[in-house]
Image (cartoon, grey):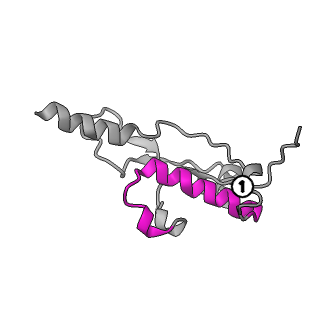
């Protein structure tokens, strides 16, 4: 049995992107709820939420591979990259079987599914 060691943390959240920004805002008790800007809330009774702002996947990932992924998948990959960077770990053929990343997320692929359903039910 091998030991498990947490060596890095990668965070993409409304409270901050990256371990340092997240922790600083958490300690300061920063309120992240504001008017939603990532999509129209015209059909909803609520228009305020805590959403991740100022997230550009290209700041963390190589641009050519990004266009086919939805926003939540991009955030997940960015968080994984931040985790590896925080750990100072480079994944290689020699260590790939010993490296793992545990993630936590919310609705994940809900938005593209909803958009697809809207198109299907229009017909």
Image quarter of residue 65: bottom left
| Image location (x, y in percent) of residue 114 | 30, 36
Q: Residue furthest front?
A: 93
Rendered view: 64 above or below 110: below
Q: Can residue 18 be seen in the rendering of this structure?
A: no
Rendered view: 48 above or below 85: above
71 drawn magenta: yes
| Image location (x, y in percent) of residue 73 | 48, 49
Image quarter of residue 18: bottom right
Under circle 1, the secondary element is helix
Magenta: main secondary structure equals helix
Location of the N terminus by quadrant is top right
Rendered view: 37 above or below 86: above
Q: Residue at x 29, y 41 (%)?
A: 41
Location of the C terminus by quadrant is top left
Q: Of 44 and 18, which appears nearest the observer?
A: 18
- Image side of residue 5 versus residue 99, left or right: right
| Image location (x, y in percent) of residue 101 | 68, 47
- The residue carrying mark 1 is 96
User: Which residues fall within the magenta stretch?
Assistant: 62-89
Label 1, residues with CA under 10 Å away: few <14, some 14-19, many ≥20: few
Q: Residue at x 72, y 65 (%)?
A: 90
| Image location (x, y in percent) of residue 84 | 69, 59
Q: Residue furthest left?
A: 123
Q: Can residue 32 be seen in the rendering of this structure?
A: yes
Please give the count of numbered marks on the rendered protein: 1
Q: Residue at x 67, y 43 (%)?
A: 102
Q: Residue at x 47, y 40 (%)?
A: 108
């Amino acid at each position: 049995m091998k030991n498990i060691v947490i060596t890095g943390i990668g965070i993409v959240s409304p409270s901050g992107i990256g371990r340092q920004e997240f922790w600083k805002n958490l300690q300061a008790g920063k309120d992240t709820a504001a008017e939603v800007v990532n999509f129209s809330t015209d059909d909803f009774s609520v228009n305020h939420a805590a959403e991740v702002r100022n997230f550009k996947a290209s700041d963390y990932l190589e641009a050519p591979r990004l266009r086919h992924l939805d926003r939540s998948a991009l955030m997940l990959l960015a968080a994984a990259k931040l985790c590896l960077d925080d750990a100072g770990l480079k994944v290689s053929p020699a260590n790939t079987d010993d490296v793992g990343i545990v993630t936590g997320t919310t609705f994940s692929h809900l938005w593209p599914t909803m958009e697809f359903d809207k198109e299907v039910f229009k017909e």
